[in-house]
């Protein structure tokens, strides 16, 4: 490795030229712009196929290998265009569920914006693609792109991270070591390494180049195998019996909100049925129960009948219940709130959702967006974000609340575990998106989070799929969609923090420094070349 990095610029260029000349038939075939454009879009489609509900995680490295072949050695502008095509091929089918009930305009706008950011990422990859050991630099630049998409614009949209397609994959243990950034990095490095291995093999390379290419493929796999001992579902603080309730909704789509009382009644009635099943000995008595997000869109603090319905259900089951509700203060924004309801004391604690979905729960630039879609007026009053992590003491178990959309954000989940959560609950409401793949994509995120922080993840959803996920990422129980149901499971309580939990954003920052180093090296080489010429 050191011989290729420290070689004189002239000798390195000669070696590069020798490889390129030996591989000239491959180079001529790959240099065609229409072919590269088709391959770039196709690599995006291949990456989409690697995501749930399909268990085809192994397609992701091959998708990145094809993309790497399209990008390597291209001009920056071409890299941007090819990246844009890759992003469209990937995100158009992945995010089609965002058009449910509102038509294609929001879907196409979101996909275009995210694809432009992927195009910018691929521009950076082309810049570092002529460096020695370029798969390393290219994978780090990919992580920089994911970090950008997770933060901007409007607070970011992390959907489509490579990590979220790896819930069934060999790389998954790396989530416990360095979180989703390290997991994504491993997939990208392996993919770019696969392409480089093929390229140098066709070019009859020197040993150093071949060794670097093989190392780029082998290192992520070896690291993932080495990280497997970090994945455990053994109890550390005993066990608890948890129940999640899926009450179902009268109908899918945005209109389910018009049936708010029916949704509340469904969840209350399913809890009453659970209590009857416990009394009859058909199921084990739970220590606590979690309802989904928006299971009571009626504010029980100002609506006595909603309060009475919830209170009766909680008293009947006889254990603490976390209730998803919408609180309507007299002034200011609405609150998407989880309420801890005690069977004796009533509501005793709350958690306000911190990551508020733009163009779903709040409308940035409302007057401008209305020019393109009147559906923005469905959100007549914006939701406001909470400030602190929410960890409920539920019959001695510390259950951390991560409401729906928040599961996509590293900091939201991590801060909840750091605040003392022994179990993670992800109460969600997917009824808006019907039977689309959205619920399976989100469930895969929850499985990755379980391994990342070594915690059981409870997923109560209004209409499905609800699930119980053990700390090793395995789904041990799940419901069908649009079916009233309740899941009861004994779960391990864990308190140990994984390296990913302890390190926090440091692995991502380290990879951003690697990306910056690669781009800085490229800039320095260009400046030196200009001065020489």
Image (cartoon, rainbow, N blue to C red):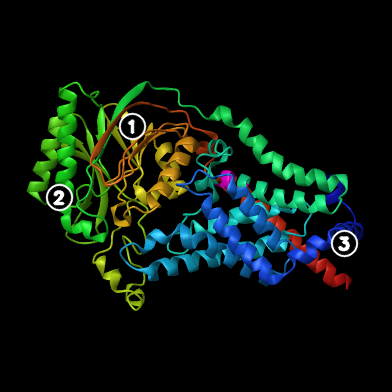
Magenta segment range?
181-185
Seen from the viewer's position, the closer of residues 343 and 378 is 378
Residue, x 72% and y 59% (percent of image)?
128
- Estimate the spatial distance between the alpha carbons at disc 3 and disc 2, rounded to whole Å: 70 Å
Image quadrant where one finds the C terminus: bottom right
Spatial distance from mark 1 to mark 3, Cα to Cα?
63 Å
Q: Position of residue 482 (x, y in %)?
A: 27, 47
**Neighbourhood count class around disc 2 (C-alpha, 10 Å): few under 14, some 14–19, many 20 upward:** some
Q: Which mark is residue 21?
A: 3
The secondary structure making up most of the magenta span is helix
Q: Alpha-carbon neighbours of circle 3 within 10 Å: few (<14), some, or many (≥20)? A: few
At 31% from the left edge and 60% from the top edge, which residue is drawn? 361
Q: Earlier in the sequence, mark 1 or mark 3?
A: 3
Check if mark 2's residue and mark 1's residue have beta carbons within 8 Å: no
Looking at the picture, tell me which residue is in the foreground, 261 or 392.
Answer: 261
- Residue 301 badge: none
Q: Nearer the viewer, residue 186 or 170?
A: 170
Residue 506 percent location from the top left of the image:
57, 45
10 Å crowding of disc 1: few (<14), some (14-19), many (20+) = many
Q: Reading the chain from its start, which is encountered first: label 3 or label 2? A: 3
Q: Badge 2 is on which residue?
A: 262
Q: Secondary structure at mark 2?
A: helix
Q: Earlier in the sequence, mark 2 or mark 1?
A: 2
Judge whether residue 182 is colored magenta: yes
Q: Residue at x 59, y 56 (%)?
A: 144
| Disc sitting over residue 398 in the figure | 1
Relative to 83, residue 328 above or below:
above
């Amino acid at each position: 490795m050191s011989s290729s990095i420290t070689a004189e610029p002239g000798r390195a260029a000669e070696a590069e030229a020798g490889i390129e000349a030996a591989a000239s038939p491959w180079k001529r075939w790959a240099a065609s712009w229409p072919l590269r454009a088709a391959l770039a879009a196709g690599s995006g489609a291949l990456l989409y196929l690697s995501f749930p509900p399909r268990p085809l995680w192994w397609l992701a490295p091959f998708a990145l290998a094809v993309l790497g072949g399209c990008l390597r050695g291209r001009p920056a502008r071409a890299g941007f265009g090819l990246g844009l095509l890759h992003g469209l091929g990937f995100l158009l089918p992945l995010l089609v569920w965002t058009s449910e009930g509102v038509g294609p305009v929001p879907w196409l706008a979101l996909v275009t914006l995210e694809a432009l950011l992927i195009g910018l990422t691929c521009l950076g990859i082309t810049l570092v693609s002529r460096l020695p050991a370029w798969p390393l630099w290219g994978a780090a630049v990919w992580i920089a792109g994911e970090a950008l998409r997770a933060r901007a614009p409007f607070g970011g949209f992390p959907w489509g991270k490579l990590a979220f397609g790896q819930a069934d994959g060999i790389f998954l243990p790396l989530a416990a070591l360095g979180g989703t950034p390290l997991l994504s990095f491993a997939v990208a490095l392996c993919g770019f390494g696969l392409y480089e291995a093929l390229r140098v093999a066709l070019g009859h390379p020197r040993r150093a180049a071949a060794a670097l290419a093989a190392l780029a493929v082998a290192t992520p796999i070896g690291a993932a195998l080495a990280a497997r001992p970090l994945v455990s579902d053994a109890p550390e603080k005993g066990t608890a019996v948890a129940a999640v309730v899926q009450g179902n909704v009268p109908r899918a789509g945005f209109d389910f909100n018009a049936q708010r009382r029916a949704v509340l009644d469904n969840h209350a009635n399913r809890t009453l049925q659970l209590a009857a099943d416990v009394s009859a000995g058909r199921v084990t008595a739970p220590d606590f129960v979690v309802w989904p997000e928006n299971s009571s869109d009626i504010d029980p603090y100002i609506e006595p009948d909603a309060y009475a319905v919830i209170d009766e259900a909680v008293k009947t089951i006889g254990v603490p219940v976390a209730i998803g509700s919408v609180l309507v203060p007299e002034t200011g924004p609405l609150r998407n709130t989880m309420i801890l309801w005690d069977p004796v004391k009533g509501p005793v604690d709350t958690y306000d959702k911190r990551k508020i979905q733009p163009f779903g729960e709040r409308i940035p630039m409302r007057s401008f967006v209305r020019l393109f879609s009147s559906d923005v007026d469905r959100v007549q009053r914006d939701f406001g974000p909470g400030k602190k992590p929410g960890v409920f003491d539920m019959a001695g178990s510390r259950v951390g609340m991560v409401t729906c959309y928040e599961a996509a954000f590293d900091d939201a989940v991590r801060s909840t575990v750091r605040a003392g959560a022994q179990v993670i609950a992800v109460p969600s409401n997917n009824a808006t998106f019907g039977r689309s793949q959205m619920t399976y994509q989100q469930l895969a995120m929850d499985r990755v989070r379980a391994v990342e922080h070594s915690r059981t993840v409870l997923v109560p959803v209004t209409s499905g799929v609800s699930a119980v996920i053990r700390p090793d990422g395995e789904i041990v129980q799940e419901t069908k969609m649009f079916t009233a149901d309740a899941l009861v499971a004994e779960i391990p309580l864990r308190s140990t923090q994984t390296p990913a939990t302890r390190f926090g954003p440091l692995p991502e920052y380290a990879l951003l420094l690697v990306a910056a180093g690669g781009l800085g090296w490229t800039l320095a080489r260009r400046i030196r070349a200009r001065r020489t010429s």
